[in-house]
Image (cartoon, helix red, strand yellow):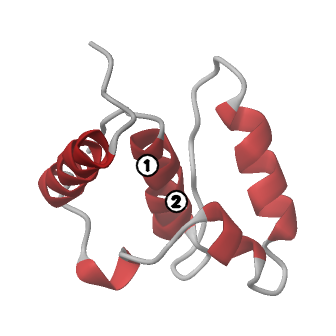
Amino acid sequence: MVTCPCPAGAAIVQRRQDRVWQQAGIPPKFSTYTLESLARIDGKTGLVDALRAWRDSRSWLLLWGPPGTCKSGAAVALLRERQAEGGQGL
């Protein structure tokens, strides 16, 4: 299926992305996380570069580390990018 590039089609795409986001079960405190916002955090540029490299691979991803090291934020940022491309995830 191809969405019409007109304003009505764009509205349909936005409603779908909003619905998918709501169904993803992401806590509200993570609602603004993106790879760009993570890259602006001191010391996280390398993480973002690694996530972008992973995104282009076909391998599994395991995020681990102590609390507060952006594991959840990284997962949400990747999910947002996936959704922006028309994909879904939980």
Task: Say which residue label 1 marks.
Answer: 79
Residue reaching furthest top? 1
Q: Name above or below for residue 56 compared with residue 73.
A: above
Q: Mark 2 touching mark 1, by CB under 8 A?
A: yes
**What residue sits 78% from the left and 73% below the top?**
44
Q: Quadrant of residue 41?
A: bottom right
- Which of these two is toward me, 65 or 16? 16
Label annotation for residue 77: 2
Q: Quadrant of residue 5?
A: top left
**What residue sits 55% from the left and 82% below the top?**
68
Q: Name above or below for residue 37 compared with residue 52.
A: below
Question: Viewed as shown, does residue 15 lie left or right of 50?
Answer: left
Other residues around mark 1 within 10 Å, as few (<14) / some (14–19) / many (≥20): many
Image coordinates of residue 19 in percent, x first then y, are 14, 52
- Which of these two is toward me, 89 or 9? 9
Question: Viewed as shown, does residue 33 lie left or right of 13?
Answer: right
Label annotation for residue 6: none
Q: Which amino acid lies under the numbered mark 2 shown in the image of this protein?
A: Ala
